[in-house]
Image (cartoon, coloured by chain):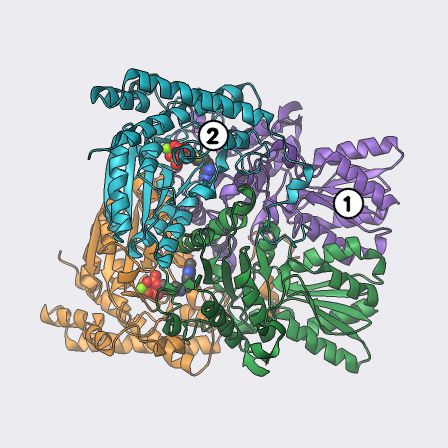
Chain colours: A cyan, B green, C orange, D purple
């Protein structure tokens, strides 16, 4: 598949945006500027980016608790994302959602969900709407290897298949759910194998390779838009960081070896993508450096924006519960 | 004005709203065949794309309805109250919370029609009356119509609402008959009953009964019999529990000084508990006697009719409670 | 597999017991002696009977709303079952459970469950106990084609597999969930195909053939007792009657054709089994007739017993909620 | 007597009961690594057969625990309150209902340890305080310990109980420290705190505070400050909500004539609502002023600390409520 340069560069840009964003979050988190949980996406950038670059703005995505990568990959605004994590009024959710609940309905980001697998049926419902409205948008949903064991996944995949919905199930198999290896919780060899149970294609993809993700997703999108139903994509990937910021206890538990982490770090998705760009002479080192630098500045600006943004006023506690403005809050 | 069944009123509301708005559709188990009844003839009129049979996957298809509502559709989901436990995560984590947690970015105009079968030997797994649970959660409107007129008018309102609505259909009322005006007879040409406005079905001066859903006919019967005994009872039907029209309740208690709350739900943390806590806090100085809660017994629903009939509030329970407050 | 005569005759006996029982229930139901729902098992007798005769008394079963066949197949007492449906104190659950909730913990019947698929995790838990207690009992659970779409099934099958539990998943594919054909709700060709997704054997069995069910279950039991984990058995079967007594509305809806019903009725599991017994000269017509007659009398006696049994006293409403006798009922 | 953390008290209770009874085991997500803390060192001591990591399948493994308990095991399940929605059907349809619906044939000695994280920026999906929901359902005992001593003693009681218990562990208390007697110091050699017996943490004559779970420290602080202002406050901690020790609450109100109920749960149909409805009905003649409910705001939990801190009952809210009742 020949991919335009513009798309290949967009992948690099968005991967760098995510990388800088996450590194910044880690840095400022450790300095105590905000609390709660935050689940870094570092190491997995190619999955969301490869997939989302294969989508249109009018397509939908939904995600999970590991939640910064998906919206940025879909073209989300890092300023609003950072401000949200800072709990500020200019954040995506006016400070009400925080790290695990970024959303931007204006560009099809239906929202990240903290309850594991809970957004999978919701994304399937967006695809149902496409079918009922006779529109050709698709809906893609990101979830983990751990999530694949939830009933919600099974039900949604079955629904998607029997109704032939334009939904793409993207399982980010980063090998662990917190400290638990997927080998001890997923009974099939590969999660992609489960696709057979729903009579849909199941595709195993190198999740460190943005282009591979792009290609697999493009296939799935074609299928979906043609009314031929869903696809399950399993992206083999790895989180380079710990499960979540602020959970020191996990770090102390020896659920994965230093070697394993080192080995996977050698397969950095950004390094892999840059190498390809250079090898195929798609881009020069200077172009690549420029993207890295620009995105770095963009994230710096986002941090500045977040820090400057005001906190919500007390009265806002009672806003946004109801569409119906007349609703009393007891 | 026509005398129609509660069940027919539901059917009319759905059909009218589906005719009015292409975005409205119905989904649930066996809705095409309308096993439960309220969907009768809809699949014939609207076709299989707008009357959708679902696999047995409450969590999955509740979520699908929520997702569809988030991107512009207006789904009506048919289910039994007892099956909501299976789809609970989608109801709570998504329907109830999405809007707030995303800072108001999304409206979720989805209606869950939750049938409450009870009183007919359906036993513990099929007889839940769990609306109090959803009152605690927040983010879900809760309707509990008690007459055919309100069933129709509240359901039409629910379907047009931009927030998720749980619409509880009391199985003991489905076969009751009542006056429902033709649309041509009502202002605006559409029977729409507003949420958050209680109905005073009967005026009285000695005691207020707040009666929820299927408790209403028993309350009315008790009130009628007590009138003959010289006790003047006011009967208030909240019609929706979220939002709750506490003003009407408090005003009634201010007038009568006494209050009995009748709730077919299990007694503990019931809607009755909530209403009594409000009156105790905000209407305390009106009260001339203790309020009394008349609710279902705090056990699961037994199958055998001889025990099941002891479960739920009866006319006699209500009369006894009123007499006690009048002592 | 050579099966002892005693077992083959036991199969016939229990199938006839179920058949008479269900016919009696239908007859008395229509006369209005009790209310609620009752889901006849007629036509599907071979499934539960073939499976349960392959089990020991110390093994466990759990079932669903179509609920009279499973306990009788496991050796349950028709007197107590009938009295329960009559809502009497001598019923299995003292009248509290009724048709959908028969149970007999003394012979491993963990109970029928009205919420579709809800007993599948519970049965899996009994198997977990076997493993933890290092005992060799197995646990079998019956559920429908409709139930197979529930997340509870997915989760339980996955658990059973990753923990290698002695649990047997028996899907009674009677082609419909109420009025909805499984072809329109199950995305795989066969439900047994889903076993692959859980790395367990998936076996498609003729559910009209008690011996086939017995053999498939015996294999699964061997595997389970040997610590090699679960099996999914899909029994192809058909309910000869309507979904549930008292739902006239279903009868009026044309979800299946008269021909289809007639064709399936030709494959009556009792007729099939009797024919085999005669053909193989395992039994004489007289022996067969005797079993039919005896079981008929047993069910008549059960009906008499049920009708004579007293209703519970009002105070019993408050009993059985808690093991803890000191618990107040508010 | 040792001063230990609430979290350590939980850990001790589990370890002691696992030592005492081979049938007791722990299961949940990442319990071997003890990501949450209360299971620290248990997998080392008891091995992977008795400390079981589960797949992410709350409905599945809740059900597995229930099934195991039905045939002789005594599982302890660790989960977060917010994940219970996913496993709701097993909690309600099986754990709560099985015994009654099967006519008392089976005991279900299973404990669900339900951690309630809130107040730390976890946002709407991770901050539920949903015990009132389970009070309505019936068939589930509900414990809400507020001190390390009660955490240990109630958890040990829960593990020995033959009924299913939901044991809510308030995240705001996990890091609090308190006196917990050594087993050798208590009669019987085992710290067992009974269910259904409230603790009166502070005696007073002017007003009763009923404080639930994490509300207790705020209530105690408010009471201490009010004492300096000449107001004598009695603080009652129900410790378990099912069963609820209404006698102690009613006796306290009979003495003080005033009552403020403080509940970290959402306000509507809360435990506070239930308690107030009981006092309103059974303690009405003792009341000299309206009761006041101090509970969480009826919105979902916002992420940003500036809003989240306005959600839950504070010491100042409690003081203000008491002053109002004293007017
Ligand atoms: C229903 C539910 N159960 C448990 C959790 C706690 N939890 C949060 S993330 C996580 C692991 C998820 O693993 P996976 O799906 O593989 O995603 P990953 O974190 O590896 O990206 C767990 C157990 C949760 N948020 N929701
Ligand atoms: C969770 C749940 N959803 C819906 C129902 C209503 N219901 C009862 S039986 C049934 C069909 C079940 O089909 P299947 O599993 O194939 O079993 P069958 O009745 O065919 O034996 C339905 C929808 C229920 N009892 N529980
Ligand atoms: Mg993972
Ligand atoms: Mg079926």
Please give the label number shown on residue B251: none
Tell me the chain of label 1. D
Q: Is residue A289 above or below residue D90?
A: above
Q: Is residue D179 above or below residue A97?
A: above
Ligand 3 quadrant assignment: top left
Q: Secondary structure at mark 2?
A: helix
Please give the label number shown on residue A78: 2
Q: Which residue is mark 1?
A: D260
Residue in the foreground of this view, choosing between A241 and D26: A241
Q: Are marks 2 and 1 in contact (CB under 8 Å)?
A: no
Q: Label 2, label 1: how many angstroms apart (C-alpha)? A: 46 Å
Tell me the chain of label 2. A
Whole-percent x and y of residue A96? 57, 38
Whole-percent x and y of residue B4? 55, 81
Residue in the foreground of this view, choosing between A13 and C244: A13
Q: How many numbered marks, from 0 up?
A: 2
Residue A251 visible to an observer of this rendering: no
Dividing the picture into quadrants, the one containing residue A57 is top left
Q: Is mark 1 within 8 Å of ligand 1?
A: no
Whole-percent x and y of residue B202? 73, 75
């Amino acid at each position: 598949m020949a991919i335009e340069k513009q798309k290949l560069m967009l992948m690099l840009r968005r991967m760098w945006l995510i990388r800088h964003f996450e590194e910044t979050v880690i840095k400022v988190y450790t300095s105590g500027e905000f609390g709660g949980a935050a689940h870094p996406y570092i190491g997995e950038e190619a999955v969301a980016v490869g997939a989302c670059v294969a989508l249109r703005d009018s397509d939908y995505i939904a995600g999970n608790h590991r939640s910064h990568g998906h919206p940025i990959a879909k073209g989300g605004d890092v300023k609003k994302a950072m401000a949200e994590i800072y709990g500020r009024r200019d954040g995506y959710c006016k400070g009400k959602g925080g790290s695990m609940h970024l959303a931007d309905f204006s560009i099809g980001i239906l929202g990240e969900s903290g309850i594991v697998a809970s957004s999978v049926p919701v994304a399937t419902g967006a695809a149902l709407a496409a079918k009922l409205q006779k529109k050709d948008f698709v809906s893609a949903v990101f979830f983990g290897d751990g999530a694949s064991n939830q009933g919600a996944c099974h039900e949604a995949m079955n629904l998607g298949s029997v109704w032939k919905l334009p939904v793409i199930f993207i399982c980010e198999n980063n090998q662990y759910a917190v400290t638990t290896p997927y080998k001890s919780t997923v009974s099939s060899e590969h999660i992609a194998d489960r696709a057979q149970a729903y009579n849909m294609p199941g595709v195993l993809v190198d999740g460190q390779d943005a282009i591979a993700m792009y290609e697999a997703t493009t296939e799935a999108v074609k299928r979906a838009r043609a009314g031929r139903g869903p696809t399950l994509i399993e992206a083999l990937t790895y989180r380079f960081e710990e499960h979540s910021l602020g959970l020191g206890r996990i770090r102390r538990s020896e659920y994965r070896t230093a070697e394993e982490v080192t080995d996977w770090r050698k397969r950095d998705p950004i390094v892999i993508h840059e190498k390809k760009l250079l090898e195929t002479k798609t881009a020069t080192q200077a172009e690549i450096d420029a993207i890295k630098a620009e995105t770095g500045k963009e994230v710096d600006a986002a941090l500045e924006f977040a820090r400057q943004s005001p906190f919500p006023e007390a009265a806002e506690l009672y806003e946004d519960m109801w569409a119906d403005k007349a609703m009393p809050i007891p | 004005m026509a005398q129609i069944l509660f069940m027919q009123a539901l059917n009319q509301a759905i059909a009218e709203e589906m005719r009015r708005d292409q975005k409205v559709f119905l989904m649930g188990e066996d809705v095409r065949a309308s096993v439960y009844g309220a969907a009768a003839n809809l699949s014939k009129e609207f076709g299989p794309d707008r009357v959708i049979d679902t696999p047995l996957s409450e969590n999955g298809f509740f979520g699908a309805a929520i997702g569809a509502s988030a991107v512009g559709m207006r789904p009506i989901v048919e289910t039994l109250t007892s099956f909501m436990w299976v789809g609970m995560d989608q109801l709570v984590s998504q329907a109830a919370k999405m809007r707030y947690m995303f800072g108001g970015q999304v409206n979720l105009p989805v209606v869950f029609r939750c049938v409450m079968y009870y009183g007919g030997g359906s036993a513990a797994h099929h007889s839940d009356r769990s609306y109090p649970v959803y009152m605690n959660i927040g983010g879900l409107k809760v309707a509990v119509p008690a007459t055919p007129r309100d069933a129709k008018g509240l359901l039409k309102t629910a379907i047009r609402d931009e927030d998720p609505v749980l619409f509880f259909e009391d199985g003991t009322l489905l076969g009751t008959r009542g006056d429902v005006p033709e649309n041509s007879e009502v202002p605006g040409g559409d029977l729409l009953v507003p949420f958050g406005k209680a109905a005073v079905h009967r005026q009285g001066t000695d005691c207020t009964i707040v009666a929820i859903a299927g408790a209403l006919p028993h309350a009315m019967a008790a009130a009628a019999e007590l009138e003959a005994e010289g006790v003047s009872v006011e009967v208030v039907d909240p019609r929706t529990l979220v939002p709750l029209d506490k003003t009407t309740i408090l005003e009634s208690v201010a007038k009568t000084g006494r209050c009995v709350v009748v709730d077919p739900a299990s007694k503990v943390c019931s809607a009755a508990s909530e209403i009594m806590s409000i009156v105790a806090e905000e209407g305390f100085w009106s009260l001339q006697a203790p309020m009394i809660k008349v609710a279902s017994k705090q056990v699961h629903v037994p199958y055998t009719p001889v025990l099941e009939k002891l479960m739920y509030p009866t006319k006699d329970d209500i009369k006894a409670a009123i007499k006690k407050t009048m002592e």
